[in-house]
Amino acid sequence: MITAALIGAGSRGLHAYGSYALKYPHELSFVAVAEPNREKGAKFAALHQINDTMVFDSWEEMLEKEKFCDALLICSPDRFHYKPVIQAIKKGYNILLEKPMSPNPQETLEIAKLATEHNVLLSVCHVLRYAPFYQELKSIIDQKVIGDIVSIQWNEHVGYYHQAHSFVRGNWGNSQQSSPMILQKCCHDLDLLQWIIGSECQSVSSYGNLTHFTSENAPEGSTLRCLDGCKVEKECPYSAMKWYLHDRDEWPANVVSVHPSIDSRLKALQEGPYGRCVYHCDNDVVDHQVINLLFEKDVTVSFTMTAFTKEICRSFRIMGTKGEIEGNDARNELKIQHFSGKTEVIIPESVAGGHMGADTSIMRDFIERVAKKEKESLTSAIVSAHSHLMAFAAEESRLSGKTVNFQEYVSNLTQETQESK
């Protein structure tokens, strides 16, 4: 039995990771929670039967105490990761940290450096590495089934409604309050590419913008809120009433209000961020972006992220010297075309849980490593920091219009981090 505490009882903390302890109570028990929203904190505490004395309004209150459990899960908003994780490292906790590590590149490097120095287990939630689908893909690549990788076409289909929910109305719509889109959403993709290719990135170039979800594109007759008498609400694909006004306890509606009643949802849409028209929000993150990456041995990658898809998935084509692989993670299918003439289709095993079972798998892996007192994982801080830096370099390229030499970028950043100490 591993005991744990949670910082941040939002959607990821409550549903993705907290639910593991409810399904496998013999493996994991939550004994404390820190959450500034008392309604959310109370809900998590009730589900996990946490004593009132161990329900905190802030992470500062929780971490004032001496270390009292085996592990700490940090699932607070992006800009509130750095301080609690630094303090948790110093107290010797085993840590599961939601991505991104920090929206600041220097803080990201500091977290990785301190975790290494203190020899603590710090796993970053790049959960897709733990998905059976991507584990199978990695195995095929490592076995050289298609020879050496030469080029990759990689696409993240964010989905029109996922973009509207999370990156327009939601917590990650404004980069000043959260993170740039390429870091918050696509650090998964850059981490997978780094892992699959298995060599160092050399240079990065990127283009992208916020094109559609702006006030200039608001339909005639639209209002600031969907419930304010909008004349186009009934035909609008982004209508808040269509997406949220029901009593089902499921995503994305369960993010809008803590309780799934119609009254709670209605109040949230009248007063909260999810009732806003998608063309009248404070969002500034891009709704489409492309990145070109050059890795060692002349491996080239073309990566596209776009909001404007019906399906939410990742699709790719990996081209090697002996064959190519096509994949679509929503269909759980890998198609290998060998240049010798043979074609095979592989259907990886399925695991229950979010992100194709990866949310379940990373929790299981983390708990096993804590129990065995291991200090490294598939997504350790130092490994994850590297793929974060690829995202930061891509954003610098997008804003500057220049190609970024990645090795120079990392070297300069490391020097700046040392000098700022």
Image (spheres, rainbow, N blue to C red):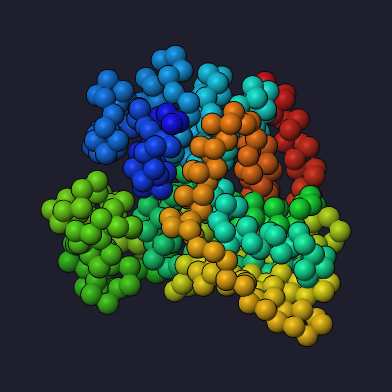
What residue is shown at x 51% (from left), y 53% (from top)? 358
Position of residue 252 measured from the top left corner of the image (x, y, whole percent): 33, 58
Pick the residue in front: 324 or 234.
324
Asked where in the image residue 305 lies, by quadrant, the reply is bottom right
Q: Can see residue 100?
A: no
Pick the residue in front: 273 or 378.
378
What residue is shown at x 63% (from left), y 31% (from top)? 375
Classify residue 267 as left or right of residue 324: left
Classify residue 310 as left or right of residue 183: left
Q: Residue most toward the bottom?
A: 341
* Vertical relation: 396 (above or below) 30: below
Asked where in the image residue 10 lies, by quadrant, the reply is top left
Position of residue 242 measured from the top left corner of the image (x, y, whole percent): 25, 68
Q: Residue most toward the left?
A: 263
Q: Can see residue 187?
A: yes
Pick the residue in front: 81 or 41.
41
Image quarter hosting the N terminus? top left
What residue is shown at x 45% (from left), y 31% (from top)? 2
Position of residue 316 measured from the top left corner of the image (x, y, whole percent): 64, 70
Classify residue 296 as left or right of residue 418: right
What residue is shown at x 70% (from left), y 53% (from top)? 194
Asked where in the image residue 169 lies, by quadrant, the reply is bottom left
Position of residue 115 measured from the top left corner of the image (x, y, whole percent): 63, 28
Image quarter hosting the C terminus? top right
